Every structure is written in C-alpha cells, then in structure tokens.
DNA sequence: ATGATTGCAAAGACTTTGCACTTAG
DNA sequence: CTAAGTGCAAAGTCTTTGCAATCAT
C-alpha cells in the first residue's frame, strides 16, 4: 500500500478535533490552504477530481460541513447568488472587494467595523461578535475600459 | 366588476417602468412597503395568501425578479442561508444588525463604508459602487440573559 | 473489530421555466 | 385585440440524507 507523507499532513490537527484523518479530508484542507479566496463546494470538487483521485460531491459537502462544525472552516453565502462558500478559518480578519466588470477579487486589509463596534456598544448596548462585508465596484482596468457590469445588476 | 382604488395605488409607477399594473404586483409592492426588513419570497407568498386572494409562488418569484430588473426592489442573499431576500429599493442606505441570541434585527443608520471609499480610491484606484454588510452580535437583552447563539455557530 | 467515513442514488429545499389560460392597455 | 401576466406542473440547481461498502484507529 502506498501511503505518501502528504496524506497525513493534517493528521494531528484532525485527530485533535476528534475526527479521522482521511485522504479526502487531507486533500480538502490542503486545497483550502492553497486557495486565496473562499471556494464553492463545486469548485473544490472539480479541482479535487483533477488533482487527486475521484471523490463524490456529497463527500465534499459532508467534509466541509464537518470542518465548519469544528470551526476549521467558515461557511458563508455569496450575496449575489445562493451558493455556499467555504474558506479556511485563519484567525486573521480580511475583506475582499469584487470588481463587477471582470469579477476579479482583491484582498484588502481595511476593516471599517472597529469604530462601529464602540459606537453601537455605547449607544444601544449591542455587542458585535462578527460581521460579513462584501464590497463591489470597478477596478482600475475595468474603469479604464468602461466595461459594463458583468451580471451584478442589483448592486 | 369590483375594482378597488387600492388596486391601482402603484399603477403610475408600474406603467412608468413599462409594465402592467396587476392585482398581484400592487399587492406585492404594498407588502414590501409595509415591511421593515428584507423578505423571502415565501414570507411574502404566505402573507399574500392570507391578506389578498390566492397567488402562486412562481408568480411571486417572477414579480420580484421583474421588479429587481427595474430596480424597484433589491435582491440579495443572507450570509447564513441560501434564501433570496427582497426589499424595496428606497434610495436611503441602511444596515441592520442581527442578534444571534434572539434573531431580532435592529436597524442602524451608521454606514462605515464612506471613508473606505476614499481610501481605496486613492490607494488602488478602485471605485466602490455598492456593498453589503451584515453584522452579528448580542443585543442588550440576550447579553443580559446570557443566551447562547441560536444557530449562527460560524460567525 | 468497530465505529467513522465514503460513494451512490435518491430526496429535499429553493428557484426557474414551458405552456395554455386570462387580463390590462 | 394582442402582448403581457398568471397558474399549474414540471424541471433545474444546489445541498442533504439513507444505506451498504470501505477505511482508520
């Protein structure tokens, strides 16, 4: 039996969470680690089929849900369609901006919520524990070439 | 034939957009106008069935999509589930905060994006045209009673 | 060995579509 | 009158689930 070291890269992490280390789970974690942006289950599924051996889409969903329940990944839904997105739960906090011309995602370090947190705390005694921010607009190139929105009519 | 004035309340608005004024369209607009928060198609459907005569769910979806294409309503998706939300496109800009203890929505006037807009413009030449912000946390009461999150584990 | 994980097929939830009937303009 | 709107049923897309086979510990 051929067992690459690769396959156990996340073994300790997984066992620590009380779940078994499997080929699929390792592959999905690895893929998420390589991904700059949140991915849909299908994107991951397609890449996994290309890179590693076969896997079923339902296994991808189940694995991602398991990871989400262990807080290893964060599940969210894109605002402009109903598809679920999954990303590794680094503890770093980051936002992206989406160009509606070319659909490129750009990471930004800025987070404008900090101030609001204090404001709401003192004004209405509301404790912010989390937030999700999606920003749309035109990047340098799309503005230049005056591209129309690709399919984000309502934003 | 009984034709209440009510039924034509939005006639001019609709005709101006090049679409016909119908009982259903008027009812949906009226309902959206009464709604403090974005509604799912099904919420609207159920209320419509109670308040007005029968309507089909597909008609609700078609009507909302038509309205969205005319920019009369804004369609979005909540971050934590896959259901589409529809709200009237007032030109006012407003955000809500969600209490993860009791699921209450609270409207806030604050919008922290203004400054960021300038920042990104000058720093990376990105023109923000829209954004979506969802904020989670504990309201005064839920903090007091130490209620656990209802079902927003990953936020 | 034994309970967890997986593939497969089927079902579920939400949304869209085709077509014949109805209605607004 | 005629194109637009609607109900109904069927299909489509994304996601979840039941069950038998397989795998990790």
Image (cartoon, coloured by chain):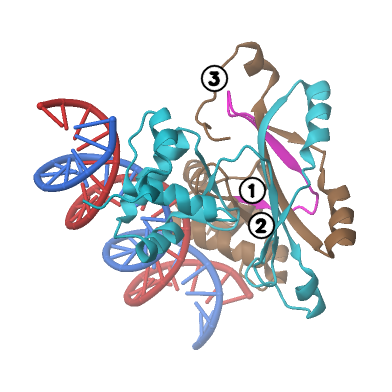
Chain colours: A brown, B cyan, C blue, D red
Residue that carries the numbered disc 3 in the rendered image:
A148
Q: Which circle's residue, 1 or 3, is located before the other in the chain?
A: 1
Both on one chain, marks 1 and 3?
A: yes
Which segment did they paint magenta? A86-105
For this rendering, which residue is in front, B39 or A69? B39
For this rendering, which residue is in front, D21 or A33? A33
Q: Which circle's residue, 1 or 2, is located before the other in the chain?
A: 1
> Where, by quadrant of the figure, is residue B102 drawn?
bottom right
Q: Are discs 1 and 3 less than 8 Å apart at CB?
A: no
Q: Are discs 1 and 2 less than 8 Å apart at CB?
A: yes
**Can you give x and y, in whole percent of width and height, for residue B149 in the image?**
69, 72
Provide the secondary structure element on which disc 1 rests: helix
How far is disc 2 from disc 3 in space, using C-alphas?
Answer: 34 Å
Residue that extends furthest to the top in the rendered view of this protein: A145
**Can you give x and y, in whole percent of width and height, for residue A153 in the image?**
52, 31
Task: Say which chain tag 3 marks.
Answer: A
Q: Nearer the viewer, mark 1 or mark 2?
A: 2
Drawn side of residue B40 relative to residue B66, left or right = right
How far is disc 1 from disc 2 in space, using C-alphas?
Answer: 9 Å
Badge 3 density bin: few <14, some 14–19, many ≥20, Cα 10 Å: some
Residue found at x 82% / y 48%: A113
């Amino acid at each position: 039996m051929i067992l690459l070291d690769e396959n156990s890269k996340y073994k300790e992490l997984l066992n620590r969470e009380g779940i078994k280390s499997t080929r699929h789970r390792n592959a999905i974690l690895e893929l998420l680690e390589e991904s700059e942006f949140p991915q849909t289950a299908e994107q991951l599924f397609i890449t996994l089929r290309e890179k590693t051996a076969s896997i079923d889409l339902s296994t991808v969903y189940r694995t991602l849900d398991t990871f989400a329940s262990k807080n290893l990944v964060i599940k969210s839904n894109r605002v402009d369609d109903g598809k679920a997105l999954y990303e590794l739960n680094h503890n770093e906090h980051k936002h992206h901006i989406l160009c509606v011309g070319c659909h490129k995602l750009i990471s930004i370090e800025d987070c404008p919520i900090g101030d609001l947190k204090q404001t709401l705390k003192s004004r209405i005694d509301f404790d912010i524990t989390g937030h999700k921010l999606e920003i749309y607009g035109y990047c340098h190139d799309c503005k230049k070439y005056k591209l129309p929105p690709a399919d984000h009519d309502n934003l």
